[in-house]
Structure formats: structure tokens, C-alpha cells
Amino acid sequence: MTGPTPTPLPHHPTAVIGAGLGGLTLARVLHAHGVEAAVFDLDASPAARTQGGMLDIHDDTGQEALRAAGLHEAFLARVHTGGQATRVLDRDARVHWSHADDGTGGRPEIDRGELRALLLESLPEGMIRWGARVTGARALDGGRHEVTLADGTAFTTDLLIGADGAWSRVRPLLSDAVPAYTGMSFVEADLRSADTRHPVSAEVVGGGMLFALGAGRGLLAHREPDGSLHVYAAVESPKEWLDGIDFTDREAAGRAVLKEFDGWAESLRALVADADAPLVPRRIHALPAGHSWPRTPGVTLVGDAAHLMSPFAGEGANLALIDGADLARALLAHPGDTEAALAAYEERMFPRAEGSARDSAAMGGTLFRPDAPERLAEMFAGHRPWAQQA
């Protein structure tokens, strides 16, 4: 006697794990051409957590992806006017470089949350399964995969795309690589209504991005469209440094962070001292530059899942966008031949990501040298190649 036939698992021809910029761009380009993908995200809703600060979207990568998605004009309508302004200071608040945003730059700024909302609004309701945290995936026959979720359910898919960030649950199907600590930690701070409540800090930061740099330390900040300032206190430190700070006590945490900036100008220290919200610690991790994998049937990665890197060249979001667009275009160009599409996508993505990862690491080395303000000012002025180390 045989038992009842097991109920087949739900099946999705294309499953995207992660509703970040890369996964959403992929889903949008496919949708615009009549191909639907199922997107799964661990957050309970689009508003479950804040999406970070400002992004500069590059003309040849991020903006190209938005053109492919049919969203470039809508993107331009949401950019932060004046956000490309840049200031470079040293630890004494001496200005080494100051450049206003005259509207001609090729890297307009947009709030990450605004950009994500633009992509979300372009997709039909129900395409994204919220509150769907992936706990694992395994290969089946014929390039198919089975994906399990935290609620105990599972589904199968013909094409599995990991767009699930630094700690991807899909990556182990392709690679043993895991992100490593880069030696740099950030502490994030926010100053609300800066022009009225924090006028000194507002003047120091200016209308766009601030780099205040010293040996092994930096205060990086940008003005957001709502008039607030978002600040990153960057410290070269052992991985354990943040563990010794009680971030539930804002004043004590501020003192601990500012101890790393003893001797810096008070106008710069105020970017941390006057924070209006709890400080947020972040360790900076990266995958090895040149991370890749052998062509594996039915699965690939986009964005940080594929090539997590430090943020110092401003490439991460741009690469996620162009990865999503390129993968979608490859799938559309090879209908019925998923393996040819994935091979074409990875052949294009791997060298691009390696170059950006090396630039990001080099730029990180440049930003925290003793002579960082002078070197960065020379780079912005065009007198020194970008991220040149010698």
C-alpha cells in the first residue's frame, strides 16, 4: 500500500531573493518586457527599516540601469538639487577643496529610500512577498532549486537569483567566500533641521558632501533633502572596538567615539556631539576583490551578494542597479536559454565588479592617510589620478 501523493511545492519560474536596488531593478526591467519574477524579502514591509543616506548615481552604471528600466526621467525629478556640492577639510577644519553643484555633474544625488520607492512603485502589487526570510537553498536536478523560508514553507524555481546582500543565503550555492572585516568601522549620526538647530554644523557640511579627514580617522557627512545632516564617523580600528561601546547610552557612546577625534576642531566634533538620535555602529566588510564562481546551472548573484565592497568609491548601489539591469537584459536576449544568459551576464559583471572593488579599497587607503585632505583635493581638481596610491 502506498501513502498519499505529496503535494507539490509552489513553483516560480524566476525567483529573486531580496528587494534591494539590484533585485528590484531586475524585476522592473523584466516586468517592463512582460516577464514576471517572484521577489522575496525578509522585511515585513517596505517601511520596516530606514534605507540609509544619500547615493550618487553614476551616469554609466546606475543611470544606465534606470534608463533600461524606463525610470530615468522619474529619477531626475527626485534628485537632490545641490547635492553634488563637495567640501574637503582637514582635522583643523581648514578647507582644502570646495566645489558648488552647478547642475552639470554626472553623479546626481538621491536619497536611497526615494530611489527604492521609485522602483517599488514601478512594480505591480503582489510581486514582492514581504516577510519571507530565506533560511536556505539546495540544488535539484536540471538547474532547479528548492528554497526554504523561516516560516517552514518552501518553493522551487527554475532560476534563482541572490540579491540578498552581504550575508546572502544564496551565495553558498556558488562560493565559499564570506565577507571579511576591512579594518574600518563607522558610527552613524543624524542632525535634524540643521540650518535652524545646528547652524555651525550646517555651514561646515555645506550643501552636499563633506570629507573631513585625518590619519586613520574621518568625519564624512552629507546634507539630505529634508535639511538634516547624516554623518559617518570613520575609525580605523580592531573589529572589537565597537563592542566596547554601549550604544544604548547616547551620551556615553558619543564620548567614546569623540575620544577617537581628540584634537579635532570643535566644529567637526559637533557633528557627533550634537546628534539628535542614537548613534548607530557599523563594521565595514568586503568580499575579496575579483570574487567569482564557476558557471553553476540555474543560479547567480547580483549586487552586494556578488561583490560586497567598501563604500569609499561610491560604487555599491550603482553596481547593484546595473547588475540587475544587465541580468534582465541578458535573460531577454536569450529566451529559453537561461545558461547562455547567465554566462553572458557573469562575463560582463565579474571584471566590472573587480575593478570597482579594487578602486574602493584603494580609495579607502587614500582617505585615511595623514595627507588625505591634500591628496583628495588634488584628485577632485584633476591633478592626481583617482585613488592613486603612489
Image: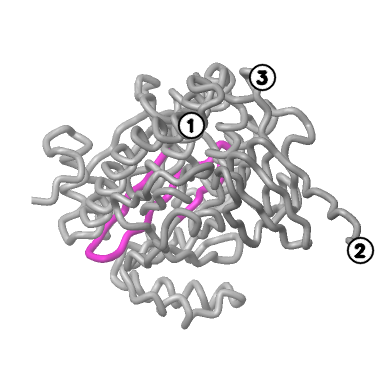
Type of secondary structure dominating the magenta stretch: strand
The answer to if 223 sits in the magenta stretch is yes
Compare residues 244 and 31 and report the one nearer the observer: 31
What mark, if any, has residue 327 been given in the picture?
Answer: 1
Q: Which badge, 1 or 3, is on the more N-terminal residue? A: 3
* SS at circle 2: loop
- Which residue in the protein does label 3 denote? 34
Contact, CB < 8 Å: mark 2 with mark 1?
A: no
The answer to if 271 sits in the magenta stretch is no
Q: Does residue 142 lie above or below 48 as drawn?
A: above
* SS at circle 1: helix
* SS at circle 3: loop
Question: Where is residue 41 shown, x and y percent of the image?
Answer: 67, 49
Q: Residue furthest front?
A: 1
User: Amino acid under label 3?
Assistant: Gly
Q: Is residue 141 left or right of residue 166?
A: right
Q: Which badge, 2 or 3, is on the more N-terminal residue? A: 2
- Which residue in the protein does label 2 denote? 1
Q: CA distance from mark 2 to mark 1?
A: 48 Å
Contact, CB < 8 Å: mark 1 with mark 3?
A: no
Q: Which residues are magenta?
A: 207-231
User: Amino acid under label 2?
Assistant: Met
Q: Residue at x 57, y 18 (%)?
A: 70
Contact, CB < 8 Å: mark 2 with mark 3?
A: no
Question: Where is residue 176 shown, x and y percent of the image?
Answer: 41, 62
